[in-house]
C-alpha cells in the first residue's frame, strides 16, 4: 500500500494497466480513444480562421477498429457551445443511445466530458465521424473511422501495399457560427471559398486562382505498387468529382459494402459519402501527378476556385506537377449521362463482408414491402417568419427532451408519431413529427428531390438497398425499373434535383434513428425526421437500456448531475459499472503484487 501513498501517478498507471488487462480478457477486444475538441487557428486557404480540432489535430485522428470490437471514445468538450459527436454509417445494434444526434441524445455542455461506448457488429468498411450540432462540421471536428475485416475473413482483392485516407470537402473561410447566422437571417450560404484535402488548401496549379504558400496534401507512393484510397466527402453542401491524373480508380467499397470492381477515370462523391478505390502506380515518374476534387453539378466555369488539389508523388519522381488539371466529366448538361455512374454501382454478391457468408445471400428482392414513405424535399420557404427546409411539408424541430428518453421517463408531448407517408396538400409547418416504423418491417423510402440542388440522404442505424434512381416524379410504375438482384447497400445516397431515388431497408434494429439530408444547410433548416423502431413485445432483451452516464435535459434536466472534466481513466470507466468493478478487483490484485 505504500506505493499508492507515495504517488498519485502510480495509481493512475495501475488503473490503466488493470484496465488494459481487463479489456484484453474480454470476449471481444476493446479499442479506446480520448477526444478533446477545441479551437485552433489555421489558414488552409491563406486566411487565418478558427477551426475545430480533435486532440489539436485538424482533421481529427483515425479511429481504427475491427469487426465486433467494443469502441470506447471519451469526448471532452472544450468548445464554447454544446457538442454531440455522431458516427454515421456505424450500425450500433439496439443502441441509439450512442448515436450522437439531438433526437436521441442530450448535448454535451461546454467543459464537460462524455463517454461513447458501443460495439461494432457485422460490419466492415470506410466511414468518418463529426460533430452533429449547429453546422459545426463546417468548421472541422471530423476524422476517419475504419472498420477492418477480422483476420479469418478474406477481403475480395489482394492486400494493398498501403492505405490512404483523403477527407475532401468544400470549405468556407467564415466559421460555422457565421454560416449559421447567414441561414438564420434568411440568406443562402453562397459559393464556398475552396475545397480542402485533409484540411489543406490546393497545390498552386494556377497562379491566378491559388495564392502562394498554401500547405497542400502530398501522397508518397512507390512505382508498381497498389494502394487503397479511402475518400470521404466531409464538406458542407457541395458534390465533388474526385480524380487522380493519369490513374484509374478501381471502386471496391462504398460505406461498408464491397462493390463489383469497376474502373473509373473520375468519380462523383456526394456530401456524406465514403468510397474506397484501389489505385495502381503504373505510370512513369517524369513528374508528380495531380489529385483533384472539384465542384460538381454547379456552374463549373463560375466555381473554378472551388477545387482542391493535392499531389501524388512517386518515390522516383523527376519533377513537380505542372500544366492544366485533368478535366472533370463534361456531362453536366446531359442529365441522363450523369446518372449512369451511380446506377452502375453494384454489390459484390460473391464477397464476404464481416461474416463468412456472402453479403448477397440476403434476397431483398423477394421480401414483401410493409410500408412505403415518399419523402419530398422542396426549396427552403418562410415558415413563421423564418427560412426553413422541409420533408413532406414539415420542418423538423428538435425536441427539448430526446425521444426515447422521454418515453422511458413518461414525458408527454415531446414529439408526435404522425409523420405523413406521402406529401400532403396543406400549409408548411414546423413540428416534431416522427415516423412510426414497423419493427421487423421492410420499408420502401422514395426520396423525391423537388429542390434545385443535389442532395444526399442518410439513415442512421441502417444500411439500405439502393434499388432505383431516375428523373421526374416517382410513381408506382417506377417499381418496374428497380434492381432486385444486386443493388448496392449503403447508408448515404444522392438524389438528383428534379429526380428521385428509391431505397429498401429491413427495420430490425430497434431504437430512434435519424433520417436526414447530409447537406448541412438543409439539415440545419429542418430537413430531417426520425424513425421510431420499437418491439411491441419489448421485454428488455431487444433494446439496450440507457447507459449509466446518460445525459438529461429538457423536462428531465433536474436529474442531471455535474459531469465536468474528469481524468481520462475515470472517463473510460463512466457508464460501465461491470467494467468498473472488474477493474477495481484487478487494481486490488495489482496492489498486492506491488506491495
Image (cartoon, rainbow, N blue to C red):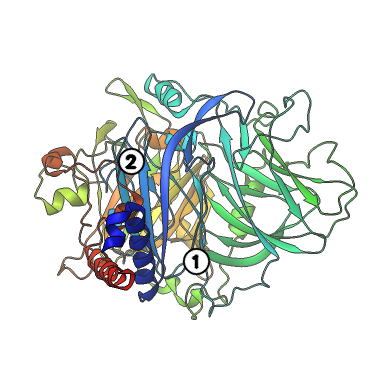
Residue 282 rendering spot, x and y as whole percentages: 83, 60
Q: What secondary structure is found at the residue carrying circle 1? A: loop
Badge 1, how many Cα within 10 Å: few under 14, some, many 20+? many
Quadrant in the picture for the N terminus: bottom left
Disc with the residue nearer the chain's start (2 vs 1): 1
Residue 539 rendering spot, x and y as whole percentages: 14, 70
Identify residue for label 1: 124
Q: Nearer the viewer, residue 465 or 584?
A: 584
Residue 139 rendering spot, x and y as whole percentages: 48, 33
Q: Is residue 53 left or right of residue 524?
A: right
Identify residue for label 2: 392
Query: Looking at the image, which residue is at 53% across and 25% down?
Result: 49
Q: Is residue 374 in view from this perspective?
A: no
Query: Looking at the image, which residue is at 79% across and 25% down?
Result: 207
Q: Measure how far apart labels 2 and 1 are at the Cα level.
A: 34 Å
Query: Looking at the image, which residue is at 49% across and 74% down?
Result: 359
Amino acid at each position: 500500500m505504500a506505493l499508492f501513498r507515495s504517488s498519485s501517478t502510480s495509481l493512475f498507471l495501475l488503473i490503466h494497466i488493470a484496465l488494459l488487462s481487463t479489456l484484453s480478457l474480454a470476449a471481444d477486444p476493446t479499442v479506446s480513444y480520448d477526444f478533446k475538441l477545441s479551437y485552433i487557428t489555421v489558414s488552409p486557404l491563406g486566411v487565418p480562421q478558427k477551426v475545430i480540432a480533435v486532440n489539436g489535430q485538424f482533421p481529427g485522428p483515425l479511429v481504427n477498429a475491427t469487426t465486433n470490437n467494443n469502441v470506447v471514445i471519451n469526448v471532452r468538450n472544450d468548445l464554447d457551445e454544446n457538442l454531440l459527436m455522431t458516427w454515421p454509417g456505424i450500425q450500433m445494434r439496439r443502441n441509439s443511445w450512442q448515436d450522437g444526434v439531438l433526437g436521441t441524445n442530450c448535448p454535451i455542455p461546454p467543459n464537460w466530458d462524455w463517454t461513447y461506448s458501443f460495439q461494432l457488429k457485422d460490419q466492415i468498411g470506410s466511414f468518418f465521424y463529426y460533430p452533429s450540432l449547429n453546422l459545426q462540421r463546417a468548421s472541422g471536428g471530423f476524422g476517419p473511422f475504419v472498420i477492418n475485416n477480422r483476420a479469418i475473413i478474406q477481403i475480395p482483392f489482394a492486400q494493398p501495399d498501403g492505405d490512404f485516407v483523403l477527407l475532401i470537402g468544400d470549405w468556407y473561410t467564415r466559421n460555422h457560427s457565421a454560416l449559421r447566422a447567414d441561414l438564420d437571417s434568411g440568406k443562402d450560404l453562397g459559393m464556398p471559398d475552396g475545397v480542402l484535402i485533409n484540411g489543406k488548401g490546393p497545390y498552386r496549379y494556377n497562379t491566378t486562382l491559388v495564392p502562394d504558400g498554401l500547405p497542400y496534401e502530398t501522397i508518397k507512393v512507390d512505382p508498381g505498387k497498389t494502394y487503397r484510397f479511402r475518400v470521404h466527402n466531409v464538406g458542407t453542401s457541395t458534390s465533388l468529382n474526385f480524380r487522380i491524373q493519369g490513374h484509374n480508380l478501381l471502386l471496391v467499397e462504398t460505406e461498408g459494402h464491397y462493390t463489383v470492381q469497376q474502373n473509373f477515370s473520375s468519380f462523383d462523391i456526394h456530401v456524406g459519402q465514403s468510397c474506397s478505390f484501389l489505385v495502381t502506380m503504373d505510370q512513369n515518374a517524369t513528374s508528380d501527378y495531380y489529385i483533384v476534387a472539384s465542384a460538381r453539378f454547379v456552374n463549373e466555369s463560375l466555381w473554378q476556385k472551388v477545387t482542391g488539389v493535392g499531389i501524388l508523388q512517386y518515390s522516383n519522381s523527376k519533377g513537380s506537377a505542372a500544366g492544366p488539371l485533368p478535366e472533370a466529366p463534361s456531362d453536366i448538361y446531359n442529365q441522363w449521362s450523369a446518372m449512369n455512374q451511380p446506377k452502375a454501382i453494384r454489390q459484390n454478391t460473391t464477397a464476404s463482408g464481416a461474416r463468412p457468408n456472402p453479403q448477397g445471400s440476403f434476397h431483398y428482392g423477394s421480401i414483401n414491402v410493409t410500408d412505403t414513405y415518399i419523402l419530398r424535399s422542396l426549396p427552403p420557404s418562410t415558415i413563421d417568419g423564418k427560412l426553413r427546409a422541409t420533408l413532406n411539408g414539415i420542418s423538423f424541430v428538435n425536441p427539448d427532451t430526446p425521444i426515447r428518453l422521454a418515453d422511458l421517463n413518461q414525458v408527454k408531448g415531446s414529439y408526435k408519431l404522425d409523420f405523413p407517408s406521402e406529401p400532403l396538400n396543406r400549409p408548411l409547418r414546423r413540428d416534431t413529427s416522427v415516423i412510426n416504423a414497423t419493427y421487423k418491417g421492410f420499408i420502401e423510402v422514395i426520396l423525391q428531390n423537388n429542390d434545385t440542388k443535389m442532395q444526399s440522404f442518410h439513415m442512421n442505424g441502417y444500411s439500405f438497398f439502393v434499388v432505383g434512381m431516375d428523373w421526374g416524379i416517382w410513381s408506382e410504375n417506377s417499381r418496374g425499373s428497380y434492381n432486385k438482384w444486386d443493388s448496392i447497400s449503403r447508408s448515404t445516397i444522392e438524389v438528383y434535383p428534379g429526380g428521385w431515388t428509391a431505397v429498401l431497408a429491413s427495420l430490425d434494429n430497434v431504437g430512434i434513428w435519424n433520417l436526414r439530408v447530409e447537406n448541412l444547410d438543409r439539415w440545419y433548416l429542418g430537413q430531417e425526421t426520425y424513425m421510431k423502431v420499437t418491439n411491441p413485445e419489448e421485454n428488455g432483451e431487444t433494446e439496450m437500456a440507457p447507459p449509466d452516464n446518460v445525459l438529461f435535459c429538457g423536462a428531465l434536466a433536474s436529474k442531471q448531475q455535474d459531469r465536468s472534466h474528469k481524468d481520462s481513466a475515470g472517463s473510460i470507466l463512466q457508464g460501465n459499472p461491470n467494467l468498473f468493478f472488474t477493474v477495481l478487483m484487478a487494481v486490488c490484485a495489482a496492489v498486492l503484487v506491488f506491495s
